[in-house]
Amino acid sequence: MQSDFQPLAGIRVVEMTHMIMGPSCGMFLGMVGAEVIKVEPPEGDKTRDLTGMGRPFFPLFNRGKKSVQLDLKSETGRKALDALLATADVFIDNFRDASLARMGADPADLRKRFPRLVLASHKGFLAGPYQDRTALDEVVQMMTGLAYMTGPTGRPLRVGSSANDIMGGLFGAFSVVAALLERQQTGKGRSLRIGLFENCLLLVAQHMVQFELEGVNPPPMPERTFSWPVYDIFDTADARQMFVGAVTEGQWVALCKLLGLDDLLSDPSLQTRMDQIDARDRTVPIVAAAIARRRADDLSREFEALGIPYSPIAKPSDMYSDPHVMRPGGLVPSRLPDGQVFRAPSLPVDVDGAMIDAGGDVPALGADTVAVLAGLGFDADEIAKARGSARKAA
């Protein structure tokens, strides 16, 4: 069932993107009602054929879109793109400007020819010394210090998802909505450039500002100076791992009482927060030994009842059996062109107390070419020429 929260209904988005950053922008806009038309070359978006960790890229970030095949090396294909853009409100891309120019979608030219069009270009960097560099999520994590902060000293690690690509697409969608609101007043579109590097820079801003204010370069997160008495991962009696935190005085007291550590509560050297933090080398092993005598499920129930922050260490696959994830609306089913169904999250937002259950099916390559181009006035012969000879059956 499609959510009735569709504030962008009536907005047409034309998308020429690949991989994650650009497609996620279109996905977010589609989830709140926009019609998103993905323009693909005759052979299709290359991410359709990825395997392994790349297998989810196309189906996950292209849910709910329409697919139109255009051979932009041909005159008819370019004519079709122009006709499509003339009906569009938004154009999303994440290709180099030179590549876009070769495809007949030079941003500067589009700005002149379609003054109401909102252009959202997803790039590696915003304008500046690095603007022409090739970027990847991993590259910008290394460049900005995020990888340094994630791994221990000498072992920089990227975070365990395409966080920057997805968040970059979200910034793209946010900026598009803002530009559409402005256009209601001005009648004119805007040219937006969203930077993967600058997105990652914002993610590490808290560490940058610590240095700016205190003159101290923070150590990597695995080696950080703790601001809480307990904030660690522990082993349980049933060979599971669990994160447990005690970040307030009440949580410290509740944790010690639950684990039978009355000696810590009565210790005169542990009566203030700073005392407890400074004594971590001594107290955390005592807490660890107490947790190691208890089973994870028992601890979970007791921690939740006491309001102690905790979490078992889960794998992504565990989310399909998590009761909160599996509540109504927690996951949205989508169907692949071959009929296979997968479940994935929608927008992490409640509207009037309910999840937005927008997801949508994954389009077959070129599935909407005939309908969209016929709606623009193209006849069957022109449609065949526009979509190119390398097309696959929709």
Image (cartoon, rainbow, N blue to C red):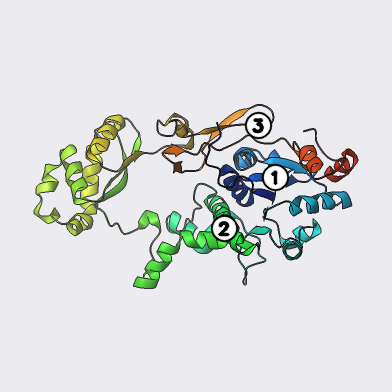
Residue 127 percent coordinates (x, y): 62, 69
Image quarter hosting the N terminus: top right
Q: Quadrant of residue 367?
A: top right
Q: Count neighbours of disc 2 (C-alpha within 10 A) and say few if under 14, some if 14 to 19, many if 20 or more.
A: few
Q: CA distance from mark 1 to mark 3?
A: 17 Å
Identify the secondary structure beneath mark 3: loop
Identify the secondary structure beneath mark 1: strand
Residue 67 percent coordinates (x, y): 72, 41
Identify the secondary structure beneath mark 2: helix
Question: Is 109 placed above or below 33 here?
Answer: below
Q: Are marks 1 and 3 in contact (CB under 8 Å)?
A: no
Q: Count neighbours of disc 3 (C-alpha within 10 A) and say few if under 14, some if 14 to 19, many if 20 or more.
A: some
Q: Earlier in the sequence, mark 1 or mark 2?
A: 1
Say which amino acid is labelled 1: Ile
Q: CA distance from mark 3 to mark 2?
A: 34 Å
Q: Earlier in the sequence, mark 1 or mark 3?
A: 1
